[in-house]
């Protein structure tokens, strides 16, 4: 009797979710936009709340855009309505809330270019660290954003056949915190860790793994980001708010006063009110902390047992030198050589060693000094709880928390607390790659500008190497003279998608 009742009840609940989350194709409206000289015709379905019990409907909303051709049995770029990849560009920046993007928004150029390539575009909104409900309870702390992106993937897969596109070809794209979330989405497919959160939201009952990840300058591996930053920058005791690219300081996410489409925050500058990113000299405590953090990095890297693509073990000695550093340096040299081949003049870059104009070596110390530090120690888990990341690891009632043992040990704020290990675990893709509990995306494209100062260049390198260790297909590069930004090489990104999807 009891079993029967439970059974009947759960099927009623299931039916409820089914109906609430079933996409209605009659929602599609014909529209068009111009991209350069071309008029793009497509259909739009906007304002779709993608969970049955939203916490914040404004952000837990997605928009769908589909090339018009797919409604007329035609093809675009060789794709049909059944085979077209589904492009999922998130608009998260600074771990702030990110509403779904429209083709006519600041960064909408990305969406239009994706449509022109024949992709189905699903633009997800996601909660972020500053959101509160009517009672002042925090509703967007970690892992809210990744849970929302997973709910989006589930919605799309649940509605296979109702929404055009191939649910086995979902490609996530994001920049900075959005790049980190893109990577996390790719690393944690179907992991049980997130299931209770998805259930509480009434997310669609479907798998949430994806096929490919595009991550621009991912601010990821947050619990190891401080040691990686000081490994790179120890000895640089002054921060510069603006990098070699000069002042920029665009707010994230486009919109009024925002960056030009496709370029966020060119030239650096931190719009998130992080005192760690101001210009100025570090004090003695910060300098001492920098040395301690740097000293902790080699054992972290060595324990990962990473190998270069040619099979060489990548390690560091206690001073932070060794084959891992040489490998990162070789990627910077590759970047210089690629830029040179395309006609760039490298003579102004003091740390590129040239022979007849051609780059032959990288002066590591020169690179570190010239690019410099944007954030003072500790860059991510600040003893004073002042960073965006401290804010990300709060909970429903506490706004800012530490998320590393080191940050907690050096804490300077009365009543400060440490985030639960599980919350920290769920934000780091490194914890899921190569584990049985997660289906990891097969294809990865990771870009980190050669003059990006928001996180250490070691971070994207470690992520890529760990993926390669587990036989995943990774395309990693540090584009020349490129600051903290994204979507700057969409033609190449889309060529990469096409090369694997076709
Ligand atoms: C972003 C930049 C940062 O420096 C950071 O610490 C977190 C996020 C961003 O641009 O999204």
Image (cartoon, rainbow, N blue to C red):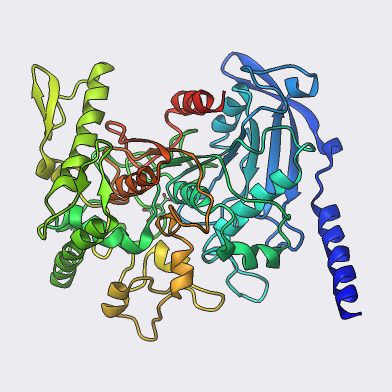
Quadrant hosting residue 25: top right
Q: Position of residue 118 (x, y in %)?
A: 63, 23
The C terminus appears in which quarter of the rendering? Answer: top right
Say left or right for 6 vs 403: right
**Residue shown at the point (13%, 70%) measured from the top left:** 284
Q: Residue furthest bottom?
A: 415
Quadrant hosting residue 461: top left
Q: Position of residue 260 (x, y in %)?
A: 47, 33
Q: Position of residue 343 (x, y in %)?
A: 25, 16
In the depicted structure, whether residue 316 falls above or below residue 331: below
The N terminus appears in which quarter of the rendering? Answer: bottom right
In the depicted structure, whether residue 492 falls above or below residue 148: above
Instruction: Report if residue 383 is visible in the image.
Output: no
Say left or right for 181 vs 111: left
Q: Name the foreground residue: 280 vs 453.
A: 453
Instruction: Report if residue 48 is visible in the image.
Output: yes
Q: Name the foreground residue: 75 vs 388.
A: 75
**Residue shown at the point (42%, 57%) measured from the top left:** 272
In the depicted structure, whether residue 481 falls above or below residue 222: above
Q: Residue furthest top?
A: 37
Say left or right for 79 vs 259: right
Q: Position of residue 376 (x, y in %)?
A: 24, 61
């Amino acid at each position: 009797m009891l079993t029967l009742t439970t059974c009947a009840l759960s099927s009623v609940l299931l039916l409820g979710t089914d109906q609430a989350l079933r996409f209605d194709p009659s929602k599609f409206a014909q529209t068009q936009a111009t991209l350069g000289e071309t008029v793009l015709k497509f259909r739009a379905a906007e304002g779709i709340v993608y969970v049955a019990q939203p916490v914040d409907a404004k952000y837990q909303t997605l928009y769908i855009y589909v090339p018009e051709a797919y409604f007329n049995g035609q093809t675009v770029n060789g794709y049909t309505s059944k085979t077209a990849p589904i492009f999922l560009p998130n608009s998260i920046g600074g771990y702030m809330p990110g509403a779904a993007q429209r083709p006519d928004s600041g960064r909408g150029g990305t969406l239009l270019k994706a449509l022109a390539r024949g992709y189905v575009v699903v633009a997800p909104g996601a909660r972020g660290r500053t959101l509160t409900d009517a009672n002042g309870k925090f509703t967007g702390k970690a892992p809210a954003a990744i849970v929302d992106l997973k709910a989006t993937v589930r919605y799309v897969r649940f509605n296979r056949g109702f929404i055009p596109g191939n649910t086995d070809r979902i490609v996530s794209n994001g920049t900075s915190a959005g790049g980190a979330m893109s990577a996390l989405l790719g690393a944690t497919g179907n992991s049980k860790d997130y299931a209770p959160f998805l259930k509480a939201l009434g997310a669609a009952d479907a798998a949430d793994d994806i096929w490919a990840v595009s991550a621009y300058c991912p601010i990821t591996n947050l619990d190891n980001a401080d040691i990686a930053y000081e490994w790179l920058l120890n000895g640089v005791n002054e921060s510069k708010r603006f990098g070699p690219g000069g002042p920029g300081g665009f707010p994230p996410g486009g919109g009024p006063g925002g960056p030009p489409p496709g370029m966020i925050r060119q030239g650096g500058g931190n719009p998130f009110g992080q005192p760690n990113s101001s210009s100025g000299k570090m004090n003695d405590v910060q300098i001492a902390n920098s040395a301690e953090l740097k000293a902790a990095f080699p054992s972290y890297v060595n324990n990962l047992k990473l190998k270069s693509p040619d099979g060489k073990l990548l390690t560091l000695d206690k001073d932070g030198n060794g084959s891992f550093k040489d490998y990162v340096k070789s990627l910077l040299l590759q970047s210089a050589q690629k830029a040179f081949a395309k006609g760039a003049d490298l003579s102004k870059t003091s740390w590129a060693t040239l022979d007849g104009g051609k780059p032959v070596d990288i002066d590591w110390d020169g690179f570190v000094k010239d690019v410099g530090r944007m954030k003072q120690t500790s860059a991510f888990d600040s003893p004073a709880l002042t960073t965006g990341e401290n804010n990300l690891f709060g909970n429903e009632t506490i706004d800012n928390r530490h998320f590393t043992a080191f940050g907690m040990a050096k804490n300077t704020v009365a009543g400060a607390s440490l985030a639960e290990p599980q919350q920290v675990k769920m934000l780091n893709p490194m914890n899921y790659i190569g584990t049985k509990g997660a289906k990891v995306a097969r294809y990865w494209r990771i870009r980190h500008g050669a003059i990006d100062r928001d996180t250490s260049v070691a971070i994207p390198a470690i992520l890529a190497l760990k993926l390669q260790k587990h036989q995943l297909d990774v395309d990693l590069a540090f584009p020349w003279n490129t600051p903290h930004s994204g979507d700057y090489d969409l033609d190449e990104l889309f060529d990469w998608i096409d090369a694997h999807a076709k």
